[in-house]
């Protein structure tokens, strides 16, 4: 299957190469020339691993042996065999995406990506080792480390901002085990770390290196495809619970940052799954809310630091894929992306905007409302949600109140409340003194909700990766890893 760039300026590649490259040469994102055909009813009736297999095989036919890859990716690594359970909480069905090895939703995709990459590497006959370079603001780094650890033929190096991630997130990364992993703190903020990584890619372009550089960033189609599965899974759960009959439409509310998670929902819809509205939930960084409501995407605004940091984002990369899928016009996408880069905003209108608004609805909530939502959901329905999930919940409520839509609503839950114990504890009126591990223990004592095992063990794990470097030294750090 051929993959094209959303900007039309790169040669098509097969699905294995699309996964290995991540980003197309013209800066665009890869999408298949035609979306695959799938019998959605059959997929929706199968178990979770079979769903994952069917969807990944349909999108990535050039990567062989998908059943084995899926099993290797997921078997025994999640808390439950169904990977992503759903729970009824008051009016909504919560889809828990955080039952993986690092308690964040990125585990679903980052458990699968390493398997896809090694198989793709073999399929195209690539000989050199792959070195994954990733800058992280917290969640991606740990999920990527855990996904890639001890995967043959691949090494991974994660840079995080020194003092710029939470205590839990730092401890998760510096205690990482595995023979092929490196973790390093960079003096500076997340942008410095990300700019440094981009600089290394630029510096190494065209050079003969002992390794092939790649990234685990969410623009890789190999990260998007595994996320389609859980929309089918949630749909099946609703059918099994008798809340819908096969064919009835379901709405989904998605806490959104880079637009990857919600785009997977849109792809599920395109595969035939009866998806009603996709609710795009944002925090105070509501650039997507404005876009979906007005058609103008404007990144010229301050970035707010919020209690849902994984949604603190001004440029949502995967939105580019939606524009391409709805318009079918790479020229238009290239023009809008140029405008976004050059002057910081662009506008879509007419039938394209109508198509977006027909399929998506957008809502946002600030930290104060997020905290009130955590408290209310806990007190009324006994469900403890993290600040990202709370934003999804609030947007779902706004949508129902404003439209009167009575179709069942699934709220995607993207992180364990124990990844953000201070915010959650404060929201439900608990005492937030002490360090993050004290807060976790107190949250568990108050709520009776168990701490995920991977987080409970963290305090006693030895620190294995203690390097702290200046951003100017990142390239040297990587070269040393390559043995240069
Ligand atoms: C990454 C992340 C998101 C945002 O997902 P996108 O695919 O970037 O839209 C939401 N919540 C949590 C906890 C995340 O880690």
Image (tube, helix red, strand yellow):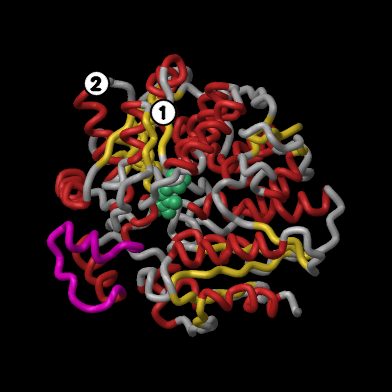
Would you say 374 lies left or right of 127 here? left
Mark 2 packing: few (<14 Cα in 10 Å), some, or many (20+)? few
Instruction: Tell me which corner region of the image, top left, top right, bottom left or bottom right, holds residue 248.
Output: top left
Compared to residue 163, the image places residue 332 above or below, namely: above
Does residue 469 appear anywhere in the picture?
A: yes
- CB of mark 2 within 8 Å of CB of mark 1? no
Tell me the element at label 2: helix
Query: Which of the labelled discs sits on residue 347, or is there none?
Result: 1
In this picture, residue 360 sits left or right of residue 110: left
Pick whichever, 143 or 410, lies toward us. Answer: 143
Per the image, the residue denoted by label 2 is 403
Q: Quadrant of the N terminus?
A: top right
Q: Is residue 419 magenta?
A: yes
- In this rendering, the label closer to the viewer, 2 or 1: 1
| Position in image of residue 413 (x %, y %) | 37, 46
Q: Earlier along the polypeptide chain: callout 2 or callout 1? A: 1
Graded by Cα atoms within 10 Å as few (under 14), some (14 to 19) or many (20 or more), the crowding at tag 1 reads some
Between residues 478 and 442, which one lies in front from this camera angle? 478
Residue at (53% x, 70% y) in the render: 159
Read off the magenta span.
418-436
Q: Can residue 386 be spotted in the picture? A: no
Question: Does residue 177 appear to the left or right of 340 in the view shown?
Answer: right
Residue 150 lies, in percent from the top left, at 68, 69
| Residue 90, magenta (yes or no) | no
Identified at 70% across, 61% down, the residue is 213
Give the CA distance from mark 2 to mark 1: 25 Å
Residue 430 occupies quadrant: bottom left
Q: Residue at x 69, y 35 (%)?
A: 9
State the quadrant of the C terminus.
bottom right
Residue 376, relative to residue 305: is it above or below?
A: above
* 477 relative to 204 in the view: left or right: left
- Residue 269's spot in the image, x, y percent? 51, 25
């Amino acid at each position: 299957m051929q993959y094209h760039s959303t900007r039309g300026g790169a040669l098509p590649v097969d699905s294995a190469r699309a996964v290995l490259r991540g980003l197309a040469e013209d800066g665009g994102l890869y999408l298949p020339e035609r979306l695959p055909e799938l019998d959605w009813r059959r997929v929706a009736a199968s178990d979770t691993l079979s769903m994952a297999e069917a969807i990944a095989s349909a999108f990535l036919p050039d990567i062989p042996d998908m059943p084995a890859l899926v099993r290797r990716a997921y078997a025994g690594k999640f808390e439950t065999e169904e990977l992503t359970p759903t729970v009824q909480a008051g009016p909504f069905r919560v889809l828990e995406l955080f039952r993986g090895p690092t308690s964040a939703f990125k585990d679903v995709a980052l458990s699968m990506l390493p398997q896809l990459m090694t198989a793709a590497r073999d399929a195209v006959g690539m000989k050199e080792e792959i070195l994954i370079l990733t800058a992280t603001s917290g969640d991606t780094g740990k999920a990527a480390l855990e996904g890639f650890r001890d995967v043959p033929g691949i090494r991974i190096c994660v840079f995080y901002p020194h003092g710029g991630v939470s205590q839990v997130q730092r401890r998760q990364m510096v205690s990482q085990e595995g023979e092929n992993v490196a973790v390093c703190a960079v003096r500076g903020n997340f942008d410095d770390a990300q700019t440094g990584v981009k600089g290394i890619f630029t510096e190494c372009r065209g050079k003969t290196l002992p390794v092939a550089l790649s990234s685990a960033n969410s623009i890789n189609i190999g990260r998007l495809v595994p996320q389609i599965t859980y929309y089918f899974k949630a749909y099946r759960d609703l059918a099994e619970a008798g809340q819908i009959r096969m064919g009835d439409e379901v709405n989904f509310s998605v806490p959104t940052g880079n637009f990857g998670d919600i785009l997977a929902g849109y792809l599920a819809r395109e595969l035939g799954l009866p998806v009603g509205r996709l609710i795009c939930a944002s925090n105070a960084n509501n650039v997507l809310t404005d876009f979906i409501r007005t058609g103008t995407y404007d990144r010229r605004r301050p970035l707010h630091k919020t209690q849902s940091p994984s949604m603190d984002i001004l440029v949502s990369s995967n939105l580019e894929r939606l524009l391409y899928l709805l318009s079918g016009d790479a020229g238009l996408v290239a023009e809008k992306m140029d405008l976004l880069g050059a002057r910081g905003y662009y506008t879509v209108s007419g039938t394209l905007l109508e198509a977006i608004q027909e399929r998506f609805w957008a809502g946002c909530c600030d930290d104060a409302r997020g905290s009130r939502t955590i408290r209310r959901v806990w007190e009324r329905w006994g469900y403890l949600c993290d600040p990202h999930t709370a934003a999804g919940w609030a947007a779902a409520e706004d949508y129902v109140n404003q439209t009167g839509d009575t179709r069942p609503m699934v709220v995607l839950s993207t992180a364990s409340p124990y990844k953000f114990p201070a915010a959650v504890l404060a929201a439900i009126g608990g005492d937030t003194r002490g360090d993050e591990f004290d807060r976790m223990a107190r949250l568990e004592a108050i709520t009776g909700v168990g701490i995920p095992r991977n987080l409970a063990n963290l305090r006693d794990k030895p620190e294995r990766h203690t390097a702290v470097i200046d951003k100017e030294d990142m390239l040297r750090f990587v070269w040393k890893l390559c043995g240069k």
